[in-house]
Image: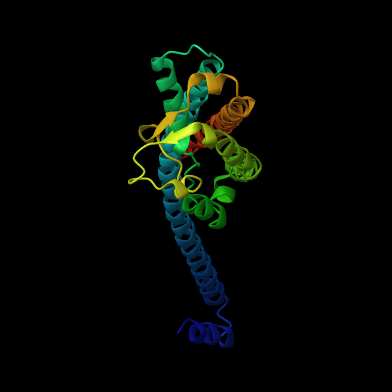
């Protein structure tokens, strides 16, 4: 319709109509482009909001879990440090020996950081970070990825220390209630303190192997403390920045 009017105006040399029809066409195209651009930006904003909300939810979960993990490894390190002192005493009391066996048995729960990757993948692959233009948040997301790799690398190196420590301790542990916990499973499923007892104290205090195994276990949790402390810091920084960005 517009093209027919435009052609008729040229044949009739009605230049006012020509200019008017051209103006209408140009404005129609511009308005169409603006509408498309507005719709695209609207869809991107909705996508960014979803990605940011998922990221924040998963960060909150990981941060809560990481705080629990940090408390656990901190307590285990402190208990094992005291346990080393108790093991060196040939006149340790029954109460002290109970604390020592509890410190050893409680290490059954080896903590591994709970990592939820969906939010990280979504906020990275959707282009949300680039569109937000928040360089601090981008660096924080990068720190999370580095933290995950660092934890994996650290566990790869210190896990053998954990197993070696238990292998050195096992000869000095007495397993109770064997009908509920088979002795053959000790290396696969380490018993908690309710299933354990210790050989006589004079044997412990004179055994360098037991003391070394206990020290290795303590040092494992000291390394875990530094890993979890840094992991908490990285998650907390990212969470604060993401929350501020979502406001």
Q: Is residue 17 above or below residue 194?
A: below
Quadrant where the C terminus is found in the figure: top left
Q: Please say if 158 is above or below 128.
A: above
Q: Quadrant of the N terminus?
A: bottom left
User: Is the image coloured rainbow, by chain, by secondary structure, or in one colour?
Assistant: rainbow
Q: Quadrant of residue 85?
A: top right
Q: Nearer the viewer, residue 99 or 34?
A: 99
Q: Is residue 75 left or right of residue 137?
A: left
**Depth check: 3 or 40 in front?**
40
Q: Is residue 237 visible?
A: no
Q: How many marks?
A: 0
**Rendering coords of residue 144 (x, y %):** 57, 42
Identify the residue shown where x is 59% and y is 32%. 220
In the displayed structure, does residue 235 sit left or right of residue 206? left
Q: Position of residue 18 (x, y in %)?
A: 56, 77
Judging depth in this view, the residue of 185 and 55 nearest the camera is: 185
Q: Residue at x 59, y 35 (%)?
A: 168
**Relative vertical location of residue 199 with respect to residue 61 in this rendering, above or below:** above
**Horizontal and vertical percent position of residue 151:** 60, 41
- Residue 99 image point, x, y percent: 42, 21
Judge whether residue 152 can be spotted in this image. Answer: yes
Q: Nearer the viewer, residue 219 or 27?
A: 219
């Amino acid at each position: 319709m517009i093209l027919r009017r435009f052609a008729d105006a040229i044949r009739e040399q009605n230049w006012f109509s020509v200019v008017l029809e051209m103006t209408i066409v140009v404005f129609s195209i511009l308005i169409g482009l603006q509408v498309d651009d507005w719709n695209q930006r609207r869809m991107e904003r909705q996508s960014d909001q979803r990605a940011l909300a998922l990221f924040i939810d998963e960060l909150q979960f990981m941060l809560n879990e990481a705080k629990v993990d940090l408390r656990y490894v901190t307590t285990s390190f402190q208990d094992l440090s005291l346990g080393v002192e108790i093991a060196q005493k040939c006149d340790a009391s029954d109460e002290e020996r109970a604390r020592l066996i509890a410190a050893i048995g409680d290490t059954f729960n080896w903590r591994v950081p709970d990592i939820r990757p969906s939010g990280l993948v979504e906020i990275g692959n959707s282009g949300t970070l680039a569109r937000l233009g928040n360089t601090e948040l981008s660096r924080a997301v990068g720190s999370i990825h580095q933290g995950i790799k660092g934890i994996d690398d650290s566990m790869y190196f210190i896990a053998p220390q954990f197993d070696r420590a238990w292998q050195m301790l096992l000869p000095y542990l007495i397993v109770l209630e064997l009908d509920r916990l088979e002795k053959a499973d000790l290396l696969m499923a380490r018993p908690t303190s309710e299933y354990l007892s210790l050989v006589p104290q004079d044997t412990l205090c004179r055994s360098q192997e037991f003391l070394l195994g206990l020290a290795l276990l303590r040092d494992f949790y000291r390394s875990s403390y530094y890993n979890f402390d840094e992991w908490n810091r990285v998650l907390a920084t990212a969470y604060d920045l993401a929350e501020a960005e979502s406001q």
